[in-house]
Image (cartoon, rainbow, N blue to C red):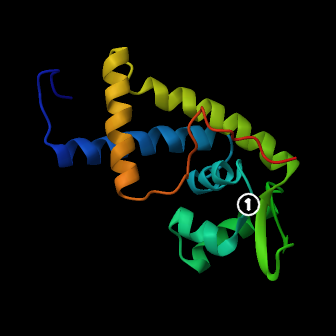
Amino acid sequence: MGSREESLGLVAALVRASFLISAVYAESARDHGLTPQQGQLLCVLMGRSYRMNDLGATLRLARSSLTELVDRTSQRGLVRREADPSDGRAVLVTLTDQGAEVAAGFYAETCDRVAGVPGGLGAGEREALADLLGRVVTDNTVGTVFPDRDDDVRPPA
């Protein structure tokens, strides 16, 4: 590990931060008996059901990879497919009651773990980091694959 004075370039800092967050996320998923992809799927579905096409675009997954992910997660009883009432040809993926419970626990613990990563920063630095990263995400049109704690993430009744 480098000293505190060591400065990384932008690319190295972003790539290393990505690896760090991915590792923290994967550990949290593992502790909840999920793969990181299953954790991501559950978090996306916390806010609402998705059509398969929209879900694939949000998760940036090819159709075959998404189908396999939904199949595996469905076999565990965490999600289900249902007909889209607005389009009988379309399929919605939604959380089951068990899936909503697992998602809520995974989400809360993952938020706590990831929030601890920049623990050495002061409140103002954390806010500035959130603002800058938020702009990067918005500028690059990243879907809501992990909602903010302030977002309404309860599944619809």
Quadrant of the rendered image containing residue 90:
bottom right
Badge 1 local density, few (<14 within 10 Å), some, or many (20+)?
A: many
Query: Which residue is most to the bottom?
Result: 89
Location of residue 13 (image quadrant): top left
Q: Position of residue 24 (x, y in %)?
A: 47, 37
Q: Is residue 34 above or below residue 68?
A: above
Residue 121 appears in the figure:
no
Question: Would residue 75 appear left or right of 117 to someone viewing this image?
Answer: right
Q: Name above or below for residue 102 compared with residue 72.
A: above
> Is 135 drawn above or below residue 58 in the view shown?
above
- The residue at 11%/28% (across/down) is 6
| Residue 55 on image: x %, y % | 63, 66
Residue 77 at what x, y percent from top left?
84, 56
Nearest the viewer among 34 and 87 is 87
**Could you tell me if residue 32 is visible in this image?**
yes
- Identity of the residue drawn at 17% across and 21% down: 4
Name the kind of residue labelled 1 in the image. Thr
User: In the drawing, does residue 92 fall left or right of residue 131?
Assistant: right
Tell which of 56 and 77 is nearer to you: 56
Say whether residue 81 is left or right of residue 127: right
Residue 149, x across and y down, in percent: 59, 33
Q: Quadrant of the N terminus?
A: top left
Q: How many marks?
A: 1
- Name above or below for residue 114 compared with residue 70: above
Residue at the limit of the structure toward the top, as seen here: 122
- Residue 16 or 129: which is nearer the viewer? 129
Which residue does the image show at 33% across and 31% down from the upper left?
A: 129
Reading the image, the residue beneath label 1 is: 73
Point 58% across, 56% down: residue? 37
Element carrying mark 1: helix
